[in-house]
Amino acid sequence: MLAQRIERLTSSLVRDILAVAQRPGVISFAGGLPASEALLNVDLAALPPELLANAMQYGPTEGERGLREHVAERMAKIGFECRADQVLILNGSQQGIDLVSKLMIEEGTPVLVEEPAYLAALQSFKLFGADLRTVPLHQGVDIDALAAILPSVQMAYLTPTFQNPSAYCYSEAERKAVAALADTHGVCLFEDDPYRELAYDTPAPAPLVSFIQSAPWIYQGSFSKTLAPGLRLGFLIAHPDLMPHLIRLKQAADLHSNRLSQLIVSQILATGQLEPHLAKSLPIYRERRDAMAAALQQHLSNHATWSLPAGGLFFWVKLHCVSDTLALMRRALAQNLAIMPGVAFMASGRDDGYLRLNFSHAKPEQIEAGIAQLAALLTE
Amino acid sequence: MLAQRIERLTSSLVRDILAVAQRPGVISFAGGLPASEALLNVDLAALPPELLANAMQYGPTEGERGLREHVAERMAKIGFECRADQVLILNGSQQGIDLVSKLMIEEGTPVLVEEPAYLAALQSFKLFGADLRTVPLHQGVDIDALAAILPSVQMAYLTPTFQNPSAYCYSEAERKAVAALADTHGVCLFEDDPYRELAYDTPAPAPLVSFIQSAPWIYQGSFSKTLAPGLRLGFLIAHPDLMPHLIRLKQAADLHSNRLSQLIVSQILATGQLEPHLAKSLPIYRERRDAMAAALQQHLSNHATWSLPAGGLFFWVKLHCVSDTLALMRRALAQNLAIMPGVAFMASGRDDGYLRLNFSHAKPEQIEAGIAQLAALLTE
């Protein structure tokens, strides 16, 4: 007999889409994969031999001291002061969602989430038994709805910067308003921030948690989108009172994060290679975003509306006259086109006729062909 | 307000011991660190560039296909037939304990554990609310006690091969007896097997789960003890019915394991480098084991009894006339000697006067000095 939570493990539909999307010949707008061309060209020969040898042994649960310090320094640059002691290195930021779920959520715990929201966060919160309460988020966050729900929850999970899937970026005023509400009600704010560096027009405002005065908070970021997801490296920063619990939860989960990846990323940060790498990869993303914008404009303007994403990896497209995006996804997949139905990101299960279209993985010519194919499907 | 399970997060006493044990000048028998001299001398230049580039992207949750096949092949060699589909690559085998806890344990779930047992497994099971039922294990497993408890539990967690901390290795007859009991009662058997390759005298019998006919089962192993813990790579093998759940739990926990580590270990297995590496490192461990055996014989024979460990990393030493091993640990630490109190491994909290002494990390001359120091402490 298995634990009851296993009944809440969501079906593998999305895993199935992503598996099919990897097949040769499929044009995929379904996943959230970085462009292969923008991935780190890792220089393993540059790793100092004595540090490499040291990285083979067990290491500290919190992560390597040097890497934690680099993360704290980078945070200061975006307007968020923290100490290296407040940084916990993660095996990718998905792990932060698991650890925070363990910290905060048990059967029936009310948790505020945006609608839409990051699918795998919803899955983790549900696995631990959360009672999800949704705040609408499309081209703006509904502050009134948020103010009404916040007093009744234990935690709010927000992705204020270039959200997956909506691409929405909270204004500074919205960040301040939400932070003030969290302070008023003493609600723990969990900010997920993996897309910050993928800003194509202007830099994002400072993290929402930087405006918090007194409420408990947890912030997390990732090296998956800036360097390479295969390295599985992210980080979490938290209110000092929460750190001892989070460190013990990390220890129980996997003792510590991969030391070779930590060494590689530490060296990149120490030698100032991240900014040049971003300067090289951002134009690739911008070109693909613009290619998808042009293709949408050309082929889909009679079928849908959307906004140009200022960052991140996705267009969030509202279809006219489509009420079953899952059925559309299946029809597209039968024609070797992979798209992600918006309903997958809705904690309420509502299907409002949205699609999430990833623009980072397919090449510009595939983007054009795939969007034309989608338009043909919608015309049928 | 945090989840109730956080109250069950065990105190950081052992973390504190291990932190102190790392200080320069301390002789440490406290941790379970492989000998630095036996760690993998990783040859990053040998990694094929196209595979390295590919490893930077997101990968499959289950792990790399090639690595899963290598694991299945190795299992066949130790008498355990499984398919690569049944292999899930882990971020170290501690992660397997987390995933299996999620799969099987909720508040009040009865779980059978050996007494003593691996500390961090007890912590994880308790975190998820397990009601731990203990079966004595010292120089033999108490099959009658096991038969009496097994019908009332959901899962049995066993480390039948060179257990941490007792070093005990179940005979083939004991393995068959336990497997038959699991079959009779349909109880899920979770076998933790990280020390199998560290066999100093004769190879260990086939895994206990290889004797199971019908009961559900999960088996896990690790590359931490054979190659390098810093790579954080382990694997889990399970009954086919359990695999879909475990894969989804892994996805929710961290999407997938580090691909660079998977590539390194795949290459080592594919090119047959693991056996030569073990042939080089086993004599180092054997020498240290024998050094500790000689030192114990010389200095501690009036104070304690023990058996020579046939594998693994620890002596399990029963002290005469010591009822508070925690107090002894503190006195030793004040003199820069780190030892692990046996009570930490007892789910029941009983202190039977045992110490766990690691022989793999300290050099032979430190082992001699540290055991002499321990004897002096006991004489005081």
Image: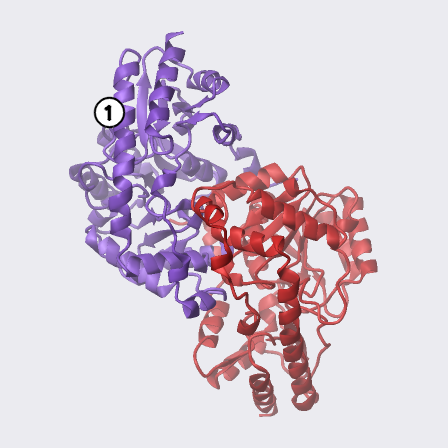
Chain colours: A purple, B red
| Residue toward you, B213 or A39 | A39
Which residue is under mark 1?
A307
For this orientation, the residue located farthest to the top is: A380
User: How many badges with numbers are in the image?
Assistant: 1
| Residue toward you, B113 or A255 | A255
Which quadrant, please, contains the C terminus of chain B?
bottom right
Q: How crowded is mark 1: few (under 14 residues within 10 Å), some or many (20 or more)?
A: some
Q: Where is residue B225 in the image (x, y as percent from the top left)?
A: 59, 64
In-image side of B174 versus A268 (left or right): right
Residue A161 shows in this picture: no
Q: Is mark 1 on a helix, strand or loop?
A: loop
Q: Position of residue A130 (x, y in %)?
A: 44, 38
| Residue toward you, B74 or A170 | B74
Relative to A84, say whether A2 is above or below. above
In-image side of A186 versus B380 (left or right): left
Residue A380 occupies quadrant: top left
Residue at 34% in and 59% down: A266
Q: Where is residue B321 in the image (x, y as percent from the top left)?
A: 66, 84
For this orientation, the residue located farthest to the left is: A173
Q: Position of residue A268 (x, y in %)?
A: 32, 57
Residue A305 occupies quadrant: top left
| Residue toward you, B379 or A173 | A173
Residue B65 shows in this picture: yes
The residue under label 1 is which amino acid type? Ser
Relative to B376, say whether A140 is above or below. above
Residue at 65% in and 43% down: B84
Relative to A191, say whether B94 is above or below. below
Residue B165 occupies quadrant: bottom right
